Amino acid sequence: MEQLLEHLATVGQRLVTEKPLPGMSIGLVTPQNQQQACYLGQIDDQAMHPVQAETIYDLASLTKLYTASAYLHLALDEKFDLDQPLKKVLPNFNHPQITFKQILGHNSGLPSSVRKTTHLTKAMLENDLYTRELLNTPGTEIHYSDVGYMLLGKALSKVMGMSLEQAMQTLVIAPLQLKETGYRTNAMPEFMAIPESRFAPTEINPDRGGELRGEVDDFKAELLGGAAGHAGIFSTQADTLTFLSDWLRPEMVALLRESRFDFRTLGWHYWRFGGEDFPSVEQDWLYQTGFTGTIMALNLKTNQGLSILSNRVYPNRQVYDWWRVDRYQMPQAFFAQ
């Protein structure tokens, strides 16, 4: 594991040195939660603010894995049927045929997002969640969907009879003993009490008062109060690795394998190669990315997990195009070991 981390650090340092990426942390973990990590660069443009073990990052869409984890824990404890329709829990949902498993695997037919407007309100967003038209018949095609995971967040709150923050605390954070993971909302006062200086900033957004530090970057999660099923969770490298070690448990892996639909499974994306003409899916390599510059990956051949935490949107989103391509160097190096 040490040799692999050194190789990943070399790749990461090149990204930090050659591109406008402030810094990153890279971590590896085993099913027994044996961890190794390294920290490169800065959290912002100040040389006196290095990335450290205690740096907390906005995980963005990696939040979807925490939402998926909550449902998998319920399913493995035989407390929830993933094949039941979402409408059974959320009666106002317009599509009675869509199941929880289809949403978890991004094959529900739900669109990627809500309506695109510069004046989106919370009421408009929540109406769209329940009423958006489908892109295709559920269970036939894959379309990555924030809408689906926002609905999963709302349903989880209903299933548990508590706020989403409390549900996540009950099902994932507390059982895994994640010490510095959570939503930055008043429903998690201990996490809210952590000084802002420990958080890596995301972007400078004049419409939201300037630099976002310890505030969720995703505008839809922000409209929902900071906690949502698709985005909103913050964490440290150590906690993300502990979280990944849980996904390496045999019962979790078995559920992922049996729930595969094409290149997706519950929360995760299978690694594909071979180009568009002859695509091939590697069934032992899974990953998920987050808009802010985060990546998680599982190598089921070597029984290891990878966590990449960065704030690649700092100070703005102009680096997005290169990061969309270059970010895959990290999981590719991880899988190629």
Image (tube, helix red, strand yellow):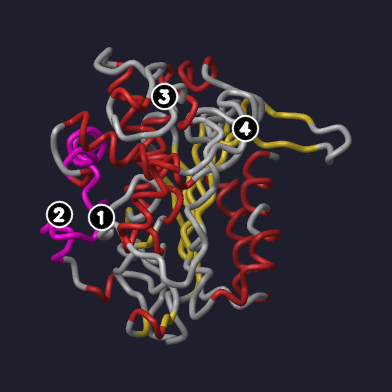
Question: Mark 4 Cα within 10 Å, few/some/many (few <14, many 20+)?
Answer: some
Residue type beneath disc 1: Tyr
**Residue carrying label 4:** 136
Observer-side mark, 2 or 4, equals 4
Amino acid carrying mark 4 in the image: Asn
Residue 57: quarter of image: bottom left
Answer with mark 4 or mark 3, whichever residue precedes in sequence.
3
Query: In 3D space, how far apart are the residues under numbered discs 1 and 2 (Cα atoms)?
Result: 7 Å
Looking at numbered disc 3 in the image, what kind of residue is underneath it?
Pro
Badge 2 density bin: few <14, some 14–19, many ≥20, Cα 10 Å: some
Identify the mark at residue 96; answer none if there is no mark: 3
The circle on residue 183 is 1
- Specify whether 141 is left or right of 212: right
Label 1 with label 2: CB-CB less than 8 Å: yes
Whole-number angstrom distance, CA of label 1 to CA of label 4: 33 Å
Residue 124 location in percent, x, y?
Answer: 37, 57
* Residue furthest to the left: 189
